[in-house]
Image (tube, rainbow, N blue to C red):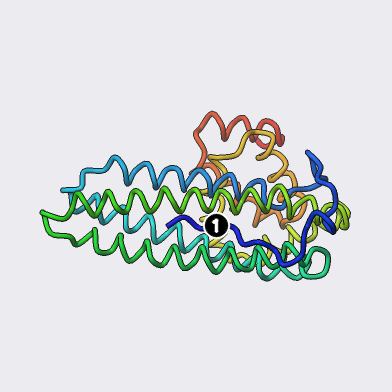
Amino acid sequence: MTAILATPTNDPTTEAPSESELVSFDLYADIHKGIRGELFRITSSAGSLDPGERCAREQLLEGVHRLFGFLVVHAEHEDQFVQPLLEVHAPYYAEVVASDHVRLEDQMAAIEARVERAASASKAEQRGRIHHVYRELAAFTSAYLEHQDFEECKVMPALDAVMGTDELVAVNAAIVASIPPEQLGDSLSLMLPAMNIEDRVELFAGAQAGMPPEVFAGVWALTGSILEVADYEALGARLGID
């Protein structure tokens, strides 16, 4: 059940700005790395778990629920903060993104129902149902990667061509400010392990400059529980944090 990107009603080749290899600020870079990593992890775990272990099947169900819930919230953030910009500056891309979000959420709902059935399956059905879930997760991962590629390679250059770095940074800051603390923790737990040291330095330098000291201290403490000790210490050294 692989989703295919919708075709815009307008031909982007006649309206879209030329693509650039680099953009001044990428709204998608960090969060997309985290999502990719978790999609790969969940799909791989579905392929390798013991289908006869009820605990393993229930853990898969919990992981799928958590990831898909995060993806829904992520799409809501894009709908609130990015979609209005696209509707003004690149309506041919706004249509694709809106259609993709609906299609991907429908696909997620269907997969969650399959995982729920697999979690409570009879002994005779366990292996077959888990394998079906694995195939569906792989197909969804493929579809979601295609969606991410469209946003990174089409949407982001289009916005970068008409908005300055400061405007894009402000949009990103507005998205982060809208995230409740418990959801911010979920975001960091996905993103940080998937990011490289330069990504992390950029993220935390901005947070350190923009957050009250006590708030940043809480975020920094949380980071210590997410990253490996060596990675945490390396980041602290780059930021001048003892």
Q: How many marks?
A: 1
* Residue 191 horizontal/vertical position (percent): 57, 46
Relative depth, front residue between 9 and 99? 9
Q: Is residue 8 shown left or right of residue 133?
A: right
What is the secondary structure assignment of the residue under circle 1?
Answer: loop
Quadrant that contains the C terminus: top right
Relative depth, front residue between 73 and 129? 129
111 up-or-down from 28: above or below = below
102 up-or-down from 240: above or below = below
Relative depth, front residue between 186 and 238? 186
Rendered image quadrant of residue 166:
bottom right
* Residue 147 horizontal/vertical position (percent): 60, 54
71 up-or-down from 38: above or below = below
180 up-or-down from 125: above or below = below
Quadrant that contains the N terminus: bottom left
Residue at image position (52%, 48%) is: 190
Within-10-Å neighbours for mark 1: few <14, some 14–19, many 20+:
some
Q: Is residue 15 shown left or right of residue 4?
A: right
* Residue 54 horizontal/vertical position (percent): 18, 53
Residue at image position (53%, 55%) is: 185
Q: Is residue 134 shown left or right of residue 74?
A: left
Residue at image position (53%, 53%) is: 144
Residue type at mark 1 is Ile
Residue at image position (29%, 40%) is: 48
Residue linked to disc 1: 4
Relative depth, front residue between 200 and 28? 28
